[in-house]
Image: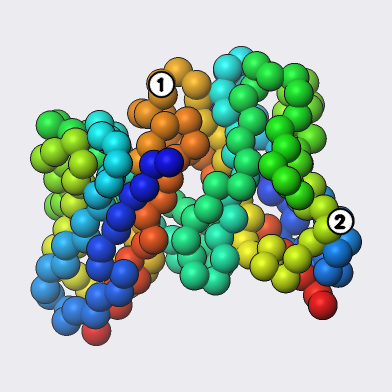
Amino acid sequence: GAVVSQHPSRVICKSGTSVKIECRSLDFQATTMFWYRQFPKQSLMLMATSNEGSKATYEQGVEKDKFLINHASLTLSTLTVTSAHPEDSSFYICSAGFYGYTFGSGTRLTVV
Amino acid sequence: AQTVTQSQPEMSVQEAETVTLSCTYDTSESDYYLFWYKQPPSRQMILVIRQEAYKQQNATENRFSVNFQKAAKSFSLKISDSQLGDAAMYFCAYRSARETSGSRLTFGEGTQLTVNP
């Protein structure tokens, strides 16, 4: 079945620095990947849709300049949180696949 | 726009008993997919079961089955013989069938299931 690998699983960074999160499709090519943010005990909130070879589509209210998405190949999408601040601390999850999407294991970001 | 509603924020069940989680959705489309995902404390999202809207037969995966009522736009999940490992947050989700890999998932708010020994 479709496997999506996400790294890192946890990251702690200082306020003002940037953090990159990778999402890879291991056994299939993903022209589209999705990036979500999830707060504790809440549902997943779609941040953006990543399209291979083109610009990502961001949801309303998501800062494009803060959350940079690059989908340079059919197996890799990256989310870079730029100039991170404590309010960016959250759980970030990617997904891709067919019909029933497969999710990465998520990244817990803590900004101190 | 499509919406998905889970009206039960929390549910509990005794081990070995049966529990049903509710989900309703709103859409103007006729062809779509519905899913139930499980998110245990590890926070890994796991696909539990999938239903294609064009299929009248309710999907079943071992102890998990759905009651899909298309006209009523209802999609409940029944867990039989509940096990401690079933304890998790369960999300109902909707996806348009227009594209095989490009349509977003719309999630419900989630139902936290507790399994009591």
Amino acid type at circle 1 is Glu
Q: Quadrant of residue B23?
A: top right
Which SS class for mark 2? loop
Is B97 left or right of B28, judged from the image as shown? Answer: left
Q: Residue furthest bottom?
A: A112
Mark 2 or mark 1, whichever is nearer to me = 2
Q: Chain of mark 2?
A: B
**What residue sits 69% from the left and 63% below the top?**
B86
Give the residue pinned by disc 2.
B18
**Above/below status of A32 relative to B114:** above
Question: In what quadrant of the picture does the C terminus of chain A appear?
Answer: bottom left
Taking the image as shown, residue B44 lies to the left or right of residue B25, namely: left
Position of residue B77 measured from the top left corner of the image (x, y, whole percent): 74, 45
Amino acid on which disc 2 is placed: Thr
| Residue carrying label 1 | B99
Q: Is residue B97 left or right of residue A48?
A: right
Residues flagged by tags 2 and 1 on a common chain: yes
Q: Is residue A65 left or right of residue B36?
A: left
Secondary structure type for disc 1: loop
| Chain containing the residue with disc 1 | B
Q: CA distance from mark 2 to mark 1?
A: 35 Å
Q: Is residue B110 visible?
A: no
Residue beneath the point at 43% across and 45% down: A102
Q: Is residue A74 above or below residue B14?
A: above
**Is the residue marked by circle 2 packed among few (<14), some (14-19), or many (20+) residues within 10 Å?**
some
